[in-house]
Every structure is written in structure tokens, then in C-alpha cells.
Image (cartoon, helix red, strand yellow):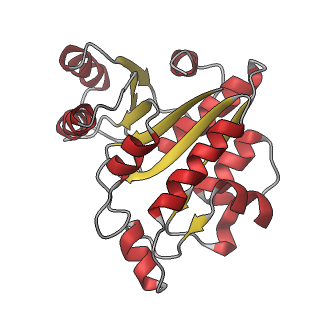
Amino acid sequence: MSAIFITATGTDIGKTFVAAGLIRYLRAQGRAVDALKPLVTGYDTARIAASDCGMLLTALGRPITDAEVARISPWRFAAPLSPDMAARRENRALDFDALVRFCRDAIKSSSGAVLIEGIGGVMVPLDDTRTVLDWMATINIPVLLVTGSYLGSLSHTLTSREALRRRGIRVPGIVVNQTPGSLVPFDETVATLKRFDPAAAVIALPRLSDATVNHPAFAEIAALI
């Protein structure tokens, strides 16, 4: 059994893309793998296949049914907002202890690798007092940090890395998912992060049309689990 939490420097950076590609790679290698996206906002019941949980289920080779969605994503909110705001729109509140328990139970019961995809960036609020950072620190598993090559990504990445370090969270790898249309040099972004964070494996993931399982970046990511 092994587990890793996938977080990012912000929203729409590529967490699900990385997770789906990693799932496909592990399955192609004959490794048992499961994935969770426990918390989803902006959930549209008319577009389940295009949702994060839908894409993870597709990568897992699982049917996109209500039961399967509920199995990997039990907390789903319609508003495309931070979880605390989205929950309030529905007169609900996220049960942080239940969220943690759900993750721990899934890890404990799995005989293979477990990928847990977070929501947004490191400091996204979950409720009135806790953030994704608190979630990661409480379940206490290694974290894969996904970033981009957009202007500002270096500051966002190093700030996120510092927040994780201060909470004692192990970050074995940083994935630089190339940002479409960015004028910032991709190779230089990767080189800079390697220079500033030599303790982590900084993995370059050029923009792909889909999560291609044979791209060497996924082998590098898989080696961290």
C-alpha cells in the first residue's frame, strides 16, 4: 500500500491531468491503483463525464455511475467556488473530520497505490477555519505539488513549497505542467525550480493532447509513490 496527495499552486493548473496520466501509466505497468477526488465544487450533474471525478473514473477504467462518483467524490457542490463558499450556498458545511476519516479508511483498505486529488491550491479554505494545507497535514502522506509555467508560477510554487515545509509535509516531487500559450520559457522554469528546491524531484511535463501513458514524465512521477 502506498498513497500520495496531489495538490497544486492554484486552480486549473493540471492536477486532474497529472492524476489521470499517472493512473493510466500505473495500470499499464500492471500496478493496482485507485484514486479519490473527495471534494468537488462546480459539479454539474449534466456534465459528469467532463468533471474531475468523471475523468479519474475514466482513467481507472470504471463506469461513470452515480455510485462510482459517490465512491470517489462523496462531497460535491454545485457552485464553482471554494468549498466553504460553495457549501454555504447549499446551507451545508463540510465535515472536516469525516473528510479525513474517508481518506484514511481508503488508504488503509487499499492493497495498491492510492492517489488523493485535492481541490484548488494549497491554501484553499475548506470551512471557517481550515484549509487544504490542514487536510494534507492531518492525513500525513507525501504530497505531489503540480505547478505551471505561467508568469508568476515560480513565486506561487516556492510560496506553496514553503507553506508545506513549515507544516512538516514531505514533498518528494514537483510537476511542472506546461501552461498553454505562456511566453515564459518552460525549460528555464524547470531549471529555476530545481535550483531553488534541490530536495524535490522537479519533473517537466510538456503539454500533451491527452494523458499519454508512455511519456517518460509519468514514469518519473510513478517512481515517487
| Residue drawn at 32 percent across, 59 percent down | 130
Task: Answer above or below: position of 200 versus 95.
Answer: above
Task: Answer above or below: position of 214 versus 57.
Answer: above
- Residue 51: image x %, image y %? 61, 59
Q: Is residue 105 left or right of residue 195?
A: right
Q: Is residue 55 left or right of residue 66?
A: left
- Residue 109: image x %, image y %? 71, 39
| Residue drawn at 17 percent across, 37 percent down | 155
Task: Answer above or below: position of 33 versus 102.
Answer: above
Q: Foreground residue, 86 or 220?
A: 86
Q: Foreground residue, 190 or 125?
A: 125
Task: Answer above or below: position of 119 versus 40.
Answer: above
Picture quarter containing residue 24? top right
Instruction: Identify the image quadrant of the N terminus.
Output: top right
Q: Is residue 178 visible?
A: no
Q: Is residue 174 visible?
A: yes
Instruction: Identify the image quadrant of the C terminus.
Output: top right
- How many numbered tags mark residues here? 0
Q: Is residue 183 left or right of residue 18?
A: left
- Residue 218: image x %, image y %? 56, 22
Picture quarter containing residue 48? bottom right
- Residue 188: image x %, image y %? 24, 20
